[in-house]
Amino acid sequence: MRRFLRILVVLATFIVLVMGAVRATTLPWFPRWAYARADFPADAYGMTAEERLRLAEACIAFLNLPHDRTLLSALQLEDGAVAFNERELQHMDDVKGVYDRLTIWAVFALTVGGIAIWALHRRGEGAAIWGALSDGGLATLIVLLLLGVLMGVAWETFFVGLHGVFFAPDTWRFYYTDTLIRLFPEPFWQLAGLVVVVMVVVPAFVLALLGRILQRRLLRSAAVEADRK
């Protein structure tokens, strides 16, 4: 039973850390920061920085709030043309569906992980709790290291493969003149990937290190208590 509960904590740790970082990046601060970078490419077709940010923030609001596609379909460019065509709107519907499902899975993982920790605590398994959290942090670091290497040496393979997991073939490919590509060009996603990795690596490293230290401390304390008896 202890082994099963520890596995649940490890899996929950990975899911919560990754999805927490994804959600933290899917907020208005990120496009503001990305667009303000000196090395971020300007729109090749003349979209102003203000218009770009306005549309990007609308996309983020669509993902995070209970809006339907009318939020996006009503948007216009500065010349009066509609901002998003039907294929772009359909893709945003698909993205929102994936985003919502992953969020539900993260909440479920957090709940299951919390219950597993509570069950271990009830059994007096404090060392097992910290050991599982440490293992979860370590497993997350290993996965992120492998993904980081793939992103570094074969970004296109990683990007295409990731989209292939979540979306139907070619539904996520657009022309360079389409608004979604103008708002979110490849450098945007490279920055997003880097930020997510950093946001995951830092807490994962802390959990891996601190969890192991506390686990060993509790095991030593338990051994001392056993010797006294």
Image: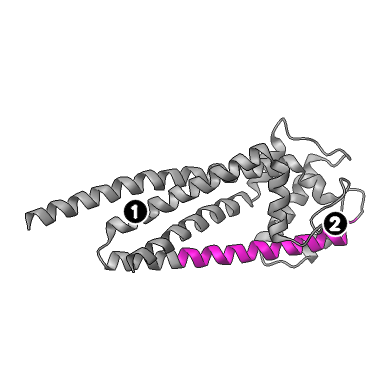
What's the residue at 40%, 52% (across, down)? 135
What's the residue at 38%, 66% (across, down)? 4
Query: What quarter of the picture does the N terminus occupy?
Result: bottom left
Asked whether 218 falls inside the magenta stretch, the response is: no
- Where is mark 2, residue-wise? 84
Q: Secondary structure at mark 2?
A: loop
Which circle marks residue 153 in the picture? none
Q: Please state which amino acid type lies under the numbered disc 2.
A: Phe
Q: Please state which amino acid type lies under the numbered disc 1.
A: Gly
Q: Secondary structure at mark 1?
A: helix
- Residue 54 image point, x, y percent: 76, 49
- Where is mark 1, residue-wise? 131
Taking the image as shown, residue 61 lies to the left or right of residue 106, namely right
Please report whichever mark, 2 or 1, sits nearer to the chain's N-terminal start. Answer: 2
- Residue 224 image point, x, y percent: 13, 51
- Residue 89 image point, x, y percent: 81, 61
Please, is residue 101 above or below residue 20 in the view? below
